[in-house]
Amino acid sequence: EHCGEINPESMYWNDVHCEEIYFWICQITKGVQLKSEPTNPPTPNYKFTSDGWLINQDKQYYFNTNKFPMEVARAFCKSNFGDLLVIEDNTERKFIWKYILQNEHVNSYFIALQLSLDKVSSWMDGTPIQYVAWAPHEPNFANNDENCVVIYRTTGLWNDINCGYPSSFICERHMNSINATIAPTPPSIKGGCPESWLLFENKCYKFFGFNQEDQKNWKNARKDCQKEEFGGNLVAILNKRVQAFLTFHLNKFQSDVWIGLNDINED
């Protein structure tokens, strides 16, 4: 935070990030004749592909303003020979920021940075991390479930959010990958569930808290699910089939059971 602001209500000063968007005050020497106001810099001459991707050196970017969870967003990028955006240096970040600054209807976009449960960051495609641009006080790992990252439109800085929270997103692809033949996907290795866990469709489920003394509040229950030996989370009920599966097994319980649904991030 290398720049200063003055609060019009308290009249106190504060240090902030220089890329915040604020009004400003100029001063000149008394008696000096005013020069004409500076004109806005010319709009950059952006170049686009025929299918709407922004061209910048050896990369192309696609800015999707529709809002989806991260997994859906990434699947869209991959289906177009790309992936979510990897920002490799400050020059690239500023290029992206100046472009998204034009669209006032979108606040933030998913990028490809991810955070593990032990708070280690990495790019989803394995690119080594050589540069980060976190917003002040970020990442804050709020509620221990913010494992994805967005770039703010107003500052171009980054914030960690819940991967399931719908957001606009930015895809990138390299020139040499466009129209390339997609390699066939190798068959998935058949897996299974640990002992005492129940397999349904492509996920494993386990019910906890049969005994009164084993019951926990929501946050502690989720922490148990997120333990290293499990690497999971409280259950997300995404369709009627999962609902029916859980309902069948809930006849063993005499009280309510925690699921992953919550509005903590909205409070």
Image (tube, grey):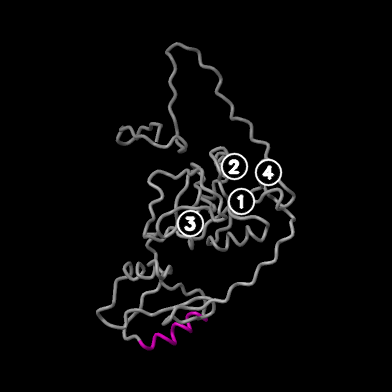
Alpha carbon distance from label 3 to label 2:
22 Å
Query: Which residue type carries mark 4?
Result: Asp
Image spot of residue 134 (x, y percent): 45, 45
Q: Which residue has dot 4 on it? A: 58
Q: Do the numbered discs 2 and 1 sit on residues whose CB atoms are within 8 Å?
A: yes
- Depth-wise, is mark 3 or mark 1 nearer the camera? 3
Q: Which residue has dot 2 on it? A: 99
Alpha carbon distance from label 4 to label 3:
26 Å
Query: Which residue type carries mark 3?
Result: Cys
- Depth-wise, is mark 3 or mark 2 nearer the camera? 3
Query: Which residue type carries mark 2?
Result: Tyr
Alpha carbon distance from label 3 to label 1:
17 Å
In terms of sequence position, does the residue under pointer 2 or pointer 1 come before the other?
1
Alpha carbon distance from label 4 to label 2:
17 Å
In terms of sequence position, does the residue under pointer 4 or pointer 2 come before the other?
4
Query: Which residue type carries mark 1?
Result: Phe
> Secondary structure beneath disc 4?
loop
Alpha carbon distance from label 2 to label 1:
10 Å
Image spot of residue 11 (x, y percent): 31, 32
Residue in the image at 58% along x and 59% along y: 74
Which class describes the residues within 10 Å of circle 4: few (<14), some (14-19), or many (20+)?
few
> Secondary structure beneath disc 1?
strand
